[in-house]
Image (tube, grey):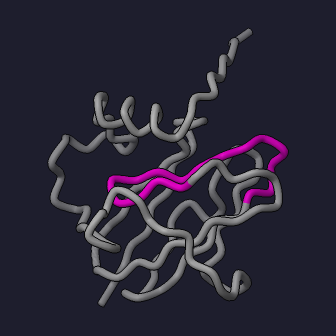
Amino acid sequence: MDTVITISIGLWNRIALRSFLRADPWGDPPGDEKSAPIGPSDERFGAPVTGKTEGPNIINIKDFAFDPEALIIQAGTIVTWTNRDSAAHNVSSDNFVSPDIAQDESYSFRFESPGIYDYYCEIHPDMKGRIIVKE
């Protein structure tokens, strides 16, 4: 039987740990040129975006997975992650880190620049996803 241990730490500690480890959940080497910077000048944190949260650019978090795992969008599109699990999750990439998302809550981010954006849940690092942004 496998044992899973989850340690809950605050957002700033997760960011410090992630910065220290610089782990790429997709297995690409550090400095991979597939990810392009997005968002405001502080590209490590994406400010939540308010507005419509229904439509084709919704990623559901359910059964400890992102659904769909990959999404292709146009630059300037808002993507919304909605947690359908009872456990909290978050969305983390080199370009933004969401706060913890409780059950039935959402987090949105506007992707301004074309590129490939790999993301994962820092709480459950086996959960991975990818956003492909086209011009």
Give the residue displayed 41% in from the left and 88% down from the top: 76
Q: Does the magenta stretch include residue 120?
A: no
Q: Is residue 94 magenta?
A: yes
The vertical placement of 8 against 111, above or below, is above
The vertical placement of 89 against 59, above or below, is above
- Count of residue discs: 0
Q: State the quadrant of the C terminus.
A: bottom left
Image coords of residue 60 (percent x, y) = 70, 64
Give the residue displayed 52% in from the left and 82% down from the top: 78
Give the residue displayed 41% in from the left and 39% down from the top: 15
Give the residue displayed 32% in from the left and 67% down from the top: 116
Q: Quadrant of residue 58?
A: bottom right
| 16 and 71: which is toward the camera | 16
Image coords of residue 4 (percent x, y) = 67, 18
Q: In which quarter of the image is residue 51?
A: bottom right
Residue 1 left/right relative to 70: right
Task: Give the magenta-colored segment's residue range.
Answer: 83-98
Q: Quadrant of residue 87?
A: top right
Image coords of residue 126 (percent x, y) = 54, 37
Image coords of residue 67 (percent x, y) = 66, 62
Residue most toward the top?
1
Residue 110 left/right relative to 86: left
Residue 27 left/right relative to 109: left
Residue 22 left/right relative to 14: left
Give the main secondary structure of the magenta stretch: loop
Q: State the quadrant of the N terminus.
A: top right
| 56 and 38: which is toward the camera | 38
The vertical placement of 4 against 76, above or below, is above
